[in-house]
Image (tube, coloured by chain):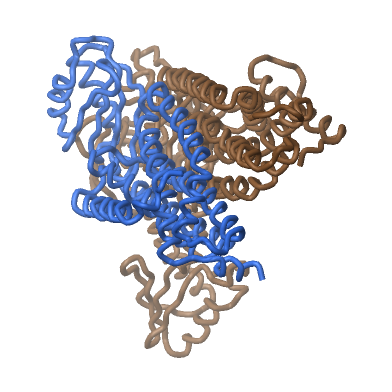
């Protein structure tokens, strides 16, 4: 049996530090919002001329007074991603097309164009925040109904940790937050919950079975009993996610990366956060016997 | 948990076959109505444009309230109630009356049968709010009145948008209302969204008005710019003809001038008015005004009584075609703004399909190999179940002709990764049971029974997340939540019916074998 409980204090300290650092990053560095949430225009270009590069494209676009323009390669040398803030000019795409054709010849294929107005982007951000909050709340209520409030608190602490640290990591690395990241965060919520519930289920079962074992020991037994399942499921999920990350194309990169972080944090938090909350709240057989009266 | 009746086996097999049949209908053509279903590809996979249009209702409301001033004036005149000083202040109508008329004015506005102030029983509200202070009134649209105006302009705009898109002939456009001032347009497989965007961005309000030199025209006059130059002309506000009078408009080549023109045919009322205007106005310039800009202002040389004519204005064939299209499909009640646009080219869509399928196949193989190595014969059972699960998932999506998006494919891959979880939970539990239990059958039965609550709880939490995503997300994200959510049901079905059946068959054959799992 692996003595997970030996390190409860150390890992709790680590988790709290991680959450605090993440929150600091979120507050002071903030998130790199994509056009979904900030508004603006995104163009994905493919050039058939290998001589065209990021800097020549940037030079050309600078002359168009687009404000803050970002030009990056997207996955490979011939694909480019151009982003700029909202412009009042309704025909901006057409004008960019003309300008690029004039400067570089007819070598571009506009593969994707997205334009999100300021009103829509603020609505999307609002609904994203609402969705994540509602998800957390529903999980809280669900666990409360199925278990006891102590378990519910433990699960929410774990979820809060996963969401905060994943977003914190995105802030640290400056990765873009768009709609698919919100989807990833919600899936992480579901996945982390999934992991926590399996261990909690075992804790509850063991609480009924043994009246003389303290929760400190009991959580460790339960974690160990479910450990192989936790690891196998994490591995298969990660295999699927890695496959999306490496082969699923550029568009799904951010999504799968967020999920990969989330699965790792989620697995960690079900062991080292959810359970330690039960220990600290001194859950005992009485806690669940009451439930069955 | 280990007992399976024959009937149950038959039902489970039939259900599985049924969905596998549906899943496979994506890959071949059939004349069978029921089976001839396919998964729809989302715009991100087949290429196309998603446009969210917002109706700018301010001019409509301003215009309505301006018209209302005249309506109120005439209405009370007919009723012999004298109202004074009626005027517009801050888009509100204000007027005053003598003390003796005060009550009757109020009555007119608050009567539920009122002609001047319609009552909406559904909302328990009048169209207009009226405020009285010292015998002077302020009239304004009520909240419900504004909503009614918006809804009606949305209905009209939707109709015009549909006509314009139909005229271009895109295949299977999706045009839907969103809220009370937005219209969502989805155009699959469109290769040039620029044209649609420019067509939808035009109100196409066409008027024929005389150019006047004297600014004291009794109808008032305004300075308007020419479409293709900075020149200006003073144009009367009196409208001779408007777009509503057009029956048809077509691009034509004028043989005399070798110029592309838009020829139009007028309805009876229009033809009459046009004939009269051209007979009395010979020598004058008739300005053709589109959305506040003069296209051209030809000098009238002859009376035109035929009810048809031509608009010239330095058109290319494309611009003449587009103008004719706009005139045929009618004017929008209010300007539309594109507040969100997402366009994916067909080649990127195809690339996404390819990479999605590659990721699915590789992810699937990795998971299958891992499980096979880990659980041997039971890994094989899990894998067979996983394949059937995939067919079930695709089959259900096909049956409902659901829309598959790129994140949707990611959802399927994720389902593959997470679907084994239930089987893993069961198998690990069985292993634990076998530590204390010599009888294989009892251990397997215990494994299934004892892992059930954990499996249910775990799947319900994921389902909750998927449901929230489904209701909050749009387009591609909805596709993800759909596959993830449906995947949970197919997983539970395949684990509890198919995998269990296979497990039972194997265990019953090897009752006595040690170290079964």
Query: Measuring 54% from the left and 71% from the top, which residue is drawn there?
Result: B126
Q: Nearer the viewer, residue B82 or A232?
A: A232
Q: Nearer the viewer, residue B473 or A15?
A: A15
Q: Is residue B124 visible?
A: yes
**Residue B456, above or below B320:** below
Q: Nearer the viewer, residue A108 or B163?
A: A108
Q: Colour of chain A?
A: blue
In which quadrant is the N terminus of chain B drawn? top right
Residue A65 at x, y percent in the picture? 15, 34
Query: Measuring 44% from the left and 55% from the top, which residue is drawn there?
Result: A275
Residue A162 at x, y percent in the picture? 37, 48
**Residue B374, above or below B468:** above
Q: Nearer the viewer, residue B261 or B320?
A: B320
Query: Measuring 35% from the left and 70% from the top, which residue is drawn there?
Result: B87
Q: How many marks?
A: 0
Asked if residue B250 lies left or right of residue B297, the reply is: right
Asked if residue B11 lies left or right of residue B445, the reply is: right
Q: Which chain is brown?
A: B
**Residue B500, above or below A155:** above
Residue B194 at x, y percent in the picture? 37, 27
Asked if residue B364 lies left or right of residue A11, the reply is: right
Q: Quadrant of residue B400?
A: top right
């Amino acid at each position: 049996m692996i003595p997970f409980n030996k390190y409860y204090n150390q890992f709790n300290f680590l988790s709290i530090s991680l959450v605090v650092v993440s929150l600091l990053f979120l507050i002071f560095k903030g998130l790199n919002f994509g056009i979904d949430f900030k508004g603006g225009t995104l163009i994905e270009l493919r050039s058939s001329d290998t001589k065209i590069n990021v800097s020549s494209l940037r030079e050309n676009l600078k002359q168009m007074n687009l404000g803050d323009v970002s030009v990056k390669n997207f996955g490979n040398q011939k694909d480019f991603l151009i982003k700029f803030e909202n412009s009042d000019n309704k025909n901006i795409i057409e004008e960019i097309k003309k300008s690029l054709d004039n400067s570089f010849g007819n070598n571009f294929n506009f593969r994707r164009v997205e334009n999100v107005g300021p009103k829509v982007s603020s609505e999307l951000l609002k609904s994203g925040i609402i969705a994540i909050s509602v998800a957390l709340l529903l999980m809280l209520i669900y666990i409360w109904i199925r278990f006891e409030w102590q378990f519910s608190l433990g699960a929410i602490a774990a979820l809060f940790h996963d969401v905060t640290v994943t977003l914190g990591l995105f802030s640290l690395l400056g990765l873009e937050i768009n709609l698919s990241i919100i989807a990833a965060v919600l899936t992480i919520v579901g996945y982390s919950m999934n992991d926590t519930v399996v261990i909690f289920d075992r804790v509850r079962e063991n609480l009924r079975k043994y009246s003389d074992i303290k929760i400190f020991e009991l959580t460790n037994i339960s974690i160990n009993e479910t450990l192989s399942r936790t690891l196998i499921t994490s591995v298969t999920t990660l295999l699927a996610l890695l496959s999306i990350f490496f082969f699923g194309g550029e568009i799904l990169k951010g999504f799968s990366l967020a999920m990969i972080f989330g699965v790792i944090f989620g697995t960690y938090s079900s062991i080292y956060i959810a359970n330690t909350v039960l220990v600290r709240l001194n859950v005992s057989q009485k806690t669940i016997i009451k439930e069955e009266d | 948990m280990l007992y399976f009746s024959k009937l149950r086996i038959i039902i489970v097999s039939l259900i599985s076959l049924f969905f596998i049949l549906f899943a496979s209908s994506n890959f071949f053509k059939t004349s069978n109505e029921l089976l001839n279903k396919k998964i729809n590809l989302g715009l991100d996979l087949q290429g196309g444009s998603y446009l969210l249009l917002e109706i700018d209702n301010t001019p409509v409301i301003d215009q309505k309230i301006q018209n209302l001033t005249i309506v109120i004036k005439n209405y009370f005149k007919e009723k012999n109630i004298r109202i004074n000083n009626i005027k517009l202040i801050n888009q509100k109508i204000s007027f005053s009356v003598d003390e003796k008329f005060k009550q009757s004015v109020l009555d007119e506005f608050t009567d539920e049968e009122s002609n001047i102030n319609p009552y909406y029983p559904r909302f328990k509200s009048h169209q207009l709010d009226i405020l009285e202070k010292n015998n002077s009134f302020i009239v304004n649209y009520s909240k419900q009145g504004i909503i009614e105006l918006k809804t009606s302009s949305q209905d009209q705009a939707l109709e015009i948008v549909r006509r314009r898109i139909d005229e271009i002939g895109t295949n299977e456009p999706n045009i839907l209302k969103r809220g009370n001032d937005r219209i969502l347009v989805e155009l699959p497989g469109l290769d040039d969204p620029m044209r649609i965007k420019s067509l939808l961005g035009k109100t196409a309000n066409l008027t024929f008005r005389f150019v006047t030199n004297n600014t004291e025209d009794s109808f008032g006059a305004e300075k308007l710019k020419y479409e293709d130059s900075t020149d200006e002309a003073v144009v009367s506000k009196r409208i001779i003809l408007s777009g509503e009078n057009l029956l048809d408009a077509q691009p034509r080549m004028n043989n005399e001038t070798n110029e592309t023109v838009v020829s139009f045919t007028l309805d009876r009322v229009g033809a009459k008015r046009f004939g009269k205007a051209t007979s009395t106005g010979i020598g004058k310039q008739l300005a053709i005004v589109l959305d506040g800009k003069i296209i051209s202002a030809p000098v009238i040389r002859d009376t035109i009584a035929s009810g048809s004519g031509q608009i010239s204005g330095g058109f290319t064939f494309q611009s003449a075609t587009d103008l004719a299209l706009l005139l045929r499909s009618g004017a929008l009640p209010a300007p539309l703004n594109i507040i969100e646009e997402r366009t994916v080219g067909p080649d990127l869509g195809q690339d996404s399909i390819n990479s999605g399928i590659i990721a699915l196949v590789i992810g699937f193989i990795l998971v299958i190999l891992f499980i096979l190595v880990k659980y041997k014969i039971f890994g094989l059972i899990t894998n067979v179940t996983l394949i059937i699960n995939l067919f079930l998932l695709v089959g259900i999506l096909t049956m409902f002709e659901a829309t598959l998006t790129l994140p949707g494919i990611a959802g399927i891959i994720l389902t593959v990764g997470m679907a084994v979880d239930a089987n893993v939970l069961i198998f690990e539990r069985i292993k634990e049971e076998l530590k204390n239990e010599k009888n294989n059958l009892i251990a397997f039965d215990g494994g299934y029974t004892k892992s059930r609550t954990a499996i249910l709880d775990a799947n319900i939490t994921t389902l909750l997340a998927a449901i929230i995503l489904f209701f909050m997300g749009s387009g591609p994200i909805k596709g993800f939540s759909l596959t993830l959510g449906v995947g949970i049901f197919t997983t539970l079905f395949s684990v509890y019916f198919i995998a269990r059946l296979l497990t039972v068959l194997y265990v019953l054959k090897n009752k006595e074998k040690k170290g079964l799992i």
